[in-house]
């Protein structure tokens, strides 16, 4: 299938859901175009509406096909480009990878609320609510379990990079921004993700983003 791909995303400093879809796309190795819509309350809704039927980002266009929602985009990319290996080959590992990906997609509300993704920020200790601490403990447990059961053959949750890593990429940035305490397998995994070339590319772009307005945290992340 010839690549004719465009991804529509929000600010790289803030848009965690955009990062998830973008990471999956980047790890396909396919060429693509990128449209970045700043989270400026005065202009963003009209701009996003030109691309997204849901009024949210990210959005993937592949030829005439439009796919929205980060996990749906990742699933589509896994099917469209099977050689990228975005899901583990082993059936048991693949089932667990899907389970932790959908858990991340649907849950961790307190962590999202208390520790919003802000790639540039360095705010040690910020956001340590009781609910956020429960979410952090669950993330640590997921990372340790996946690495211990399925992590042979590479530094990622299931050895090689998968959609599960794309889903947890924003959490890695959150933990760096808010200096969340990590050790053992969780520390090793977070360090491997921060060393991932795609994560570094995103972080470098976020560092030089022009953000002339305060973080608005609009409800435009799907």
Image (cartoon, rainbow, N blue to C red):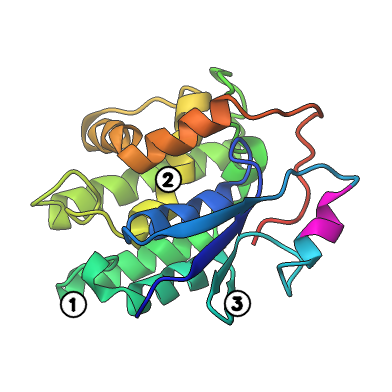
Where is residue 96 drawn, in percent x and y?
28, 67
Q: As displayed, is residue 175 above or below residue 55?
A: above
Location of residue 167 (image quadrant)? bottom left
From the image, tell me which residue sits under label 3: 66
The residue drawn where x is 61% and y is 60% is 58
What residue range appears in magenta?
Answer: 43-47
Quadrant where the image shows the N terminus: bottom left
From the image, tell me which residue sits under label 2: 169
Q: Separation of disc 1 and disc 2 at Cα?
A: 23 Å
Neighbor class of circle 1 (other Cα within 10 Å; few <14, some 14-19, many 20+) is: few
Where is residue 71 drawn, in percent x and y?
49, 67
Q: Which mark is residue 91?
A: 1
Neighbor class of circle 3 (other Cα within 10 Å; few <14, some 14-19, many 20+) is: some
- SS type, badge 2: helix
**Front disc: 3 or 2:** 3
Instruction: First in sequence, mark 1 or 3: give its number.
Output: 3
- SS type, badge 3: strand
Kindly check if marks 1 and 2 are in contact, taking CB atoms under 8 A apart as contact: no
The residue drawn where x is 21% and y is 56% is 158
Q: Nearer the viewer, residue 147 or 215?
A: 215
The residue drawn where x is 91% and y is 45% is 42
Where is residue 27 drawn, in percent x and y?
33, 55
Neighbor class of circle 2 (other Cα within 10 Å; few <14, some 14-19, many 20+) is: many
Q: Nearer the viewer, residue 184 or 62?
A: 62
Q: As drawn, is 197 to the left or to the right of 93?
A: right
Q: Separation of disc 3 and disc 2 at Cα?
A: 24 Å
């Amino acid at each position: 299938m010839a690549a004719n791909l465009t991804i529509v995303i929000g600010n790289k400093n803030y848009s965690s859901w955009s990062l998830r879809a973008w990471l999956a796309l980047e790890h396909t190795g396919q060429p693509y175009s990128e449209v970045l819509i700043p989270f400026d309350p005065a202009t963003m809704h009209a701009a996003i509406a030109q691309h997204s039927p849901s009024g949210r980002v990210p959005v993937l266009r592949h030829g005439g096909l439009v796919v929205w929602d980060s996990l749906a985009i990742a699933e589509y990319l896994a099917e469209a480009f099977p050689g990228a290996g975005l899901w583990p080959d082993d059936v048991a590992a693949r089932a667990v990878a899907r389970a932790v990906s959908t858990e991340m997609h649907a849950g961790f509300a307190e962590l999202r609320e208390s520790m919003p993704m802000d790639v540039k920020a360095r705010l040690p200790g910020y956001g340590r609510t009781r609910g956020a601490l429960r979410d952090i403990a669950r993330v640590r447990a997921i990372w340790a379990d996946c690495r211990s059961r399925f992590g042979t053959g590479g530094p990622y949750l299931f050895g090689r990079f998968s959609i599960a890593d794309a889903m947890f990429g924003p959490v890695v940035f959150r933990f760096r921004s808010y200096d969340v305490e990590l050790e053992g397998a969780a520390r090793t995994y977070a360090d491997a993700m921060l060393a991932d070339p795609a994560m570094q590319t995103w972080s470098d772009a976020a560092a030089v983003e022009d953000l002339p307005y305060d973080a608005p945290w609009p409800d435009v992340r799907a």
